[in-house]
Amino acid sequence: MHAPNAIQRRASRQIHVGNVPIGGNAPIAVQSMTNTDTLDVDATVRQVRQLETAGADIVRVSVPTMDAAEAFGRIRQAVNVPLVADIHFDHKIALRVAELGVDCLRINPGNIGREDRVRAVVSAARDRGIPMRIGVNAGSLEKSLQRKYGEPTPEALVESALRHIDHLDRLDFADFKVSVKASDVFMAVAAYRDLASRIEQPLHLGITEAGGLRSGTVKSSIGLGMLLMEGIGDTLRVSLAADPVEEVKVGFDMLKSLKLRTKGINFVACPSCSRQNFDVIDTMNQLEERLEDVMTPLDVSIIGCIVNGPGEAKESDLGLTGGSPANLLYLDGKPAQKLRNDNLIDDLERLIRDKVREKQQREKDTIARSV
């Protein structure tokens, strides 16, 4: 019913973070990071589970101390989603979380000191099948690069990444992904474009320290959207000064808008005007809140009047077009029944969930026939 996805993904080496493939032909993974105190195991486990429920493929946890490493081990045992340990400077922390079941190490080899320390971390990762992420950030460039370039630039970000990559290349370790994040959209986009042409490893996208929920969403959507449209990016994190669950929601909405992921409901809704025959904004707010648990792909259009409503509904799995004295519901692009405004939201939730169950059953039947 829709135009085919025209985005040609950049070819990249595939790695696995736990059971989640990153790169190659794998779907672009959405991840977030906990903002609880890692030493507070209960609070961190609770937040990881919230992120997993929201659909996060991977969750990152900061591990700044050896005590936090021990806490990380308890967190790892209590959750199912793959966990990345965010580590800086102390290679012993990396060695400990490797023993405790970490799924990926976020660590810059150049920041952990002598070659023997880097070798020890790489050896532990290799032995346990643990990939790494090299994470370059414009706010924490090496002093030598700050002196060389005077200020953060795309070239400085890429040079920093290549320095860290060289450590792993010398040790013949190729299972890593790379990020070159900046809070400036132009800088980040230029750096990712450059790096994408230089290495085969998957790229972790992000506009770092993007801002609050609204401004950060806009900035991230512009920067990451430009890269994703060019086929660049294998996993992403939307960095927001907000509840981390919002990062996951925005990430999936971004990918759904580009037809790169189809998890959950894809809502099409009008901004509403005086022609509307029901309260579109309240209806959408309530439906999004009530249906957050739905992970089955479904296109749902909620349009307040008959100007654009029928056209959108014909392209949706389920569509509602405002009308008087009753609104018209479409199923699979065809008029199905009329709904009055009384109990409209309850009726819509019930019908959408019925449609989800129907789609799930069709998928089960298709799998059963193919076995």
Image: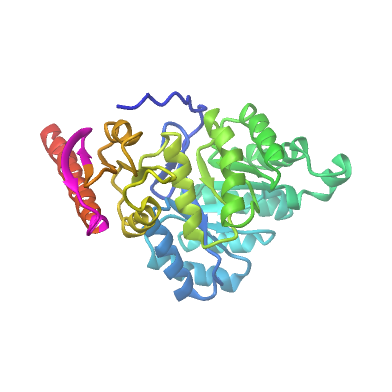
Q: Is residue 173 visible?
A: no
51 versus 307 height, above or below: below
| Residue 231 falls left or right of residue 3 | right
| Residue drawn at x 17%, y 49% as measured from the top left | 354
How did the renderer colour the structure? rainbow
Q: Position of residue 303 (x, y in %)?
A: 34, 42
| Residue 341 falls left or right of residue 190 | left
Where does the N terminus fall, quadrant-wise?
Answer: top left
Q: Nearer the viewer, residue 119 or 353?
A: 353
Magenta-colored stretch includes residue 333: yes
| Residue 29 falls left or right of residue 173 | left
Where does the C terminus fall, quadrant-wise?
Answer: top left
| Residue drawn at x 50%, y 38% as measured from the top left | 234
| Residue drawn at x 37%, y 24% as measured from the top left | 3
Q: Quadrant of residue 174?
A: top right
130 versus 314 height, above or below: below
Q: How many marks?
A: 0
Q: Quadrant of residue 270?
A: top left
| Residue 118 falls left or right of residue 292 | right
Q: Position of residue 22 (x, y in %)?
A: 46, 40
Q: Nearer the viewer, residue 43 or 68?
A: 43
Q: Is residue 7 visible?
A: yes
Q: Position of residue 82 (x, y in %)?
A: 43, 55
Q: Nearer the viewer, residue 183 or 167?
A: 183
**Which residues make up the magenta segment?**
329-345
Q: Position of residue 284 (x, y in %)?
A: 37, 52
Magenta-colored stretch includes residue 355: no
